[in-house]
Image (spheres, rainbow, N blue to C red):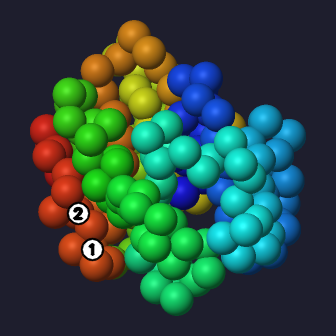
Amino acid sequence: MSSLARYFNSKSWIVGGYDKTQTVLTQELEKEGIEVHYDDRGSSIPDKFKDKEETLVIYTPAVPKDLGELEYLHQNGFTVYKRAQVLGMITLNTKTLAVAGTHGKTTTSSLLAHILNESKLKCNAFLGGISSNLNSNFISNEESELTVIEADEFDHSFLHLSPFAAI
C-alpha cells in the first residue's frame, strides 16, 4: 500500500491513510507529507478525506472487513477499491512486467527494476518491500513506458493486471 501512497503523492494528490501501529515505514511516509492516523474509527478520518466525490479509497484484502474505518466508508457510500484494482488501472497503459511466484517476488522485482533503471530503458516500479539501495518501494520514471510490479496471487489480485510480460 505504501508504494501506492508514494505514487499518488508523487502526482501531487493529497494522500492519507490508516495503519494499526506506527512503524519506521509510516514515519517515512509522514516525512514525505503523507498523513497517517492510527485510530480505526470512522470519526478519525480527517475531514479533507470525507468527500466521497473527491476521495479515492484503496484497501488491501489483509484489512479485516469489520475495521471501523472501512465500515464507515462503506456505510457512507464511498467507492472502495482493492489495491490490485488500482494497480491494474495505473498500469493499464504501460508495458507491465509482472513478477509472480510463491517466493522471491520482491527480490526478483527489485533486481529487475534495478537492472532496467541502470540501463537506458528505465522503469516505474511498485515493489512489495523496501529496496535497500533506494530506501523506497516505489520508483518513478515518467519517461519510461515500463512498469515492474509483483503479481500477488492472494485473493486473486493478479487477475486485475494486464501484463506485457510475466516472470
Seen in the image, is 66 located left or right of residue 37?
A: left
The residue that mark 2 highlights is 158
Q: Quadrant where the C terminus lies?
A: bottom left
Q: Is residue 105 above or below residue 94?
A: below
Tell me the quadrant of the picture where the N terminus can be found.
Answer: bottom right
The x, y position of residue 61, in whole percent, is 42, 76
Q: What residue appears at the point 29 percent right and 21 percent down from the top-left corner?
A: 145
Relative side of 77 to 63, left or right: left
Name the residue furthest front: 76
Residue at (79, 36) in percent of width and height: 33
> Can you identify the residue that label 1 sits on?
153
Q: Quadrant of residue 104?
A: bottom left
Q: Dot 2, crowdedness within 10 Å: few (<14), some or many (≥20)?
A: many
Q: Is residue 106 left or right of residue 149?
A: right
First-in-chain label (1 vs 2): 1
Task: Please provide percent x and percent y for residue 22.
Answer: 84, 68
Q: Quadrant of residue 100?
A: bottom left
Q: CA–CA distance between discs 1 and 2?
A: 6 Å
Residue at 42% of width from left, 58% of height from top? 78
Amino acid bearing label 2: Phe
Q: Secondary structure at mark 2?
A: helix
Mark 1–mark 2 CB contact (< 8 Å): yes
